[in-house]
Image: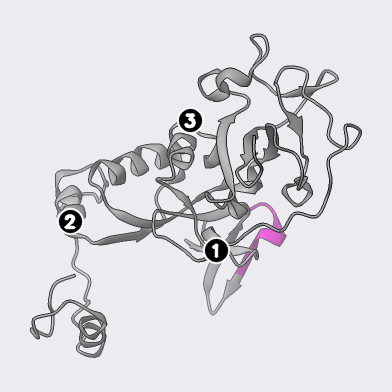
């Protein structure tokens, strides 16, 4: 953001001036608006923070572009993007994490003729049609206070409640709220754990269901996490940093 009010500083007063003087007006693009176009890349270079809803089908490519140009960002994406090898790598390296989430349904405006078969996932307000989408989260590299909050642990480890995987040197923790307070080994947790991930409390080691990210914890050749032959959805392998090894 430039020094809009010309006072020699770039701060919240520039935002105030921008809003009060209608300086934040939109301008049509000359091209088709593709984020990969030269026109959009030039605009990207000028931006300090990117806040948008990128095309989910091109989420990997869009995030790669933001990383390439070293941009701060706050973008919407599907929760399953956590499992993408490119996105997981950034999360593991603490270069990307989840932002705040109200936990409620998120409604997106769509064209009035947009087909939504499920009645519960659509609504029309003042002639505007909305479509609800589940599992939509904010992905960001802007620091947040919640990212440094301690996850309170209250359960103790026992082999009955925390079975070992057939093919990973780790125990299964089916809910992040059940992470045992006294276990210093490798644990597999659901991808929803990322919303509670504090890099000072836990270390992300690997990810199941991917040979590339299974690391040294995989036993055998099948990366899909299993317990007694039952296949499980992606798990994040973590360790508790607070416990001495």
**Residue assigned mark 2:** 43
Q: CA distance from mark 1 to mark 2?
A: 31 Å
- State the image quarter where residue 73 is shown: bottom left
Which range of residues does the magenta coloring cover?
115-123
Q: Horizontal placement of 21 versus 216: left or right?
A: left
Location of residue 218 with respect to 192 vertically, above or below: above
Of residues 15 and 240, the one nearer the viewer is: 240
Q: Secondary structure at mark 3?
A: helix
Q: Secondary structure at mark 2?
A: helix
Mark 3 or 2: the one toward you: 3
**Residue assigned mark 3:** 85
Q: CA distance from mark 3 to mark 2?
A: 28 Å
Q: Secondary structure at mark 1?
A: helix
- Indicate the quadrant containing the C terminus: top left, top right, bottom left or bottom right: top right
In primary-sequence order, the first of circles 1 and 2 is 2
Rendered location of residue 140, percent (x, y):
42, 54
Of residues 225 and 64, the one nearer the viewer is: 225
**Residue assigned mark 1:** 146
């Amino acid at each position: 953001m430039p020094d809009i009010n010309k006072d020699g500083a770039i701060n919240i007063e520039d935002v105030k001036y921008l809003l009060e003087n209608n300086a934040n007006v939109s301008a049509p693009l000359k091209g088709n608006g593709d984020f990969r176009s030269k026109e959009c890349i030039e605009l990207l270079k000028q931006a300090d923070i990117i806040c948008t809803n990128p095309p989910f089908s091109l989420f990997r490519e869009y995030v790669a572009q933001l990383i390439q140009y070293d941009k701060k960002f706050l973008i919407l994406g599907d929760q399953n993007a956590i499992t993408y090898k490119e996105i997981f790598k950034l999360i593991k390296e603490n270069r990307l994490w989840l932002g705040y989430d109200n936990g409620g349904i998120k409604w997106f405006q769509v064209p009035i003729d947009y087909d939504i078969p499920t009645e519960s996932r659509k609504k029309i307000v003042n002639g505007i049609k909305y479509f609800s989408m589940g599992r939509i989260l904010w992905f960001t590299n802007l620091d947040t206070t919640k990212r440094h909050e301690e996850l309170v642990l209250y359960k103790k480890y026992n082999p009955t409640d925390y079975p070992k995987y057939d093919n990973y040197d780790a125990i299964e923790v089916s809910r992040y709220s059940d992470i045992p307070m006294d276990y210093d080994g490798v644990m597999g947790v659901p991808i929803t754990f990322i919303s509670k991930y504090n890099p000072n409390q836990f270390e992300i080691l690997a990810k199941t269901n991917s040979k590339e990210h299974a690391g040294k914890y995989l036993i055998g050749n099948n990366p899909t996490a299993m317990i007694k032959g039952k296949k499980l959805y992606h798990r994040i392998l973590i360790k508790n940093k607070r416990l001495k090894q």
